[in-house]
Amino acid sequence: MASTLSLLVFPVDMDAAKHFISVSQSLGVNIIGASSVASPNITVDLDHFTHMPYITDPAFTAALKAAVEDYSVTHIYTPHPGVWAHLKYLQTKQPDHYSFKLCDPSPVQAIWDDTVSSYEWAENMALDVFLNTLELDPVSTLKPRLTGGRYISLHKQFFRIPGECDINKLTALAHISRTLPQGDLVEIGSFCGRSAFAIAWLAKQYEIGNLISIDPWSSQKTEDQGQQAEILNRRIGAVDFDKIFLVYISNMLLLDNVGYIREISSEAINQYKQTTQQGILNSSELSPISVSGAISLLHIDGNHRYTHVCQDIEAWAPYVMLGGWILLDDYVWAFGDGPLVMGLW
């Protein structure tokens, strides 16, 4: 059934319009792009395109009415504050002539809406509810909380990176980082780098050390996660891990305390041992980082099969220092045995 929604996006050549158009197209919405630029740079596919005068041009009102009628426009989306304000004014002045739905919120309000959850999270970080539930090791020294602005910055960047790591893990990482001794930080399974970014960013703030991501980024080296995870297993070959790796690199280049070993965990441990002897890990595209051989934080988020999680712990736990942490991802997992069974064992 064809969509009854007809969306006019104006100006369509603003970068903020691209994501909105992508989501709308996935829902089958008819997209009409409009621009006042003579030769607009349009990087998305449109159902129709029309040229519109600038809103300061006396001919704009007539052109808008014509576009709405010609394309049966039901909704208008604009990422431009001035255009939104003018369209809102026209609707208020002559509601019968402008019956289309002007997408809310306004572009200015949308800027705040994009930040408000980060602001609220930063306020919650002022509470020590999480840490109050822990019995900290006597050797642990609790570092001070970061400023609200720093927490906001972390939250915003964290959720701009693709991944399944959620707000609960970010909260845990932010609190746990205050207890970590100086040493290496190792993450097994990084994918696009969402949790890797958080760990490395926090380590930078507290001068803990450098992060090493362990991930093969390869469908050939990625092993299946068991019979119960067949839904996940059958998609492994369809993932272009080279592209995912480039996404990871683009996110890690925001920092200078990250390196990686592009190998499965059982093989990477040998490279880690060699690297500790040299004291330096060189990773293509990223800055060289120092490696101490003593792990402050071990984040295990690779293959979730019981046997694989056990192997990761057996291989890497001996390098975790006194006062360090071992974090297991997906302790309760819908696709198999995983860390939960291991924890009950």
Image (cartoon, grey):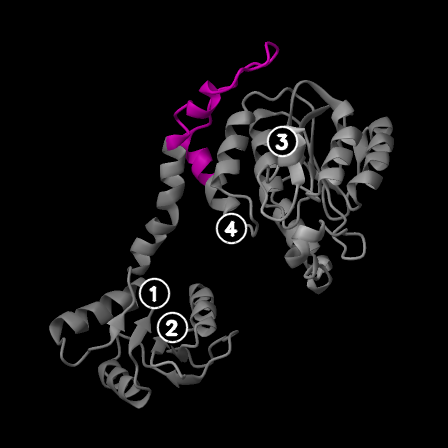
Q: Which mark is residue 80?
A: 1
User: What residue sits right under mark 3 in the picture?
Assistant: 327
* Horizontal and vertical percent position of residue 227: 71, 52
In the rendered view, tell whether residue 47 sits above or below residue 103: below
Asked if the residue under mark 1 is in contact with the one under mark 3, i.e. CB atoms within 8 Å, the reply is no
User: Quick check: is 145 in the magenta stretch?
Assistant: yes
At horizontal 59% and vertical 43% (from top left) the residue drawn is 333
Quarter of the figure with the C terminus: top right
| Mark 3–mark 2 distance (CA, rounded to whole Å) | 47 Å
Say what secondary structure mark 3 lies in: strand
Q: Quadrant of the N terminus?
A: bottom left
Nearer mark to the viewer, of 4 and 2 = 4
Q: Position of residue 154 (x, y in %)?
A: 49, 39
Q: Nearer the viewer, residue 30 or 112?
A: 30
Vertical comparison of 308 with 76: above or below: above
User: In this picture, which residue range is highlighted in magenta?
Assistant: 124-153
Q: Residue at x 32, y 59 (%)?
A: 107
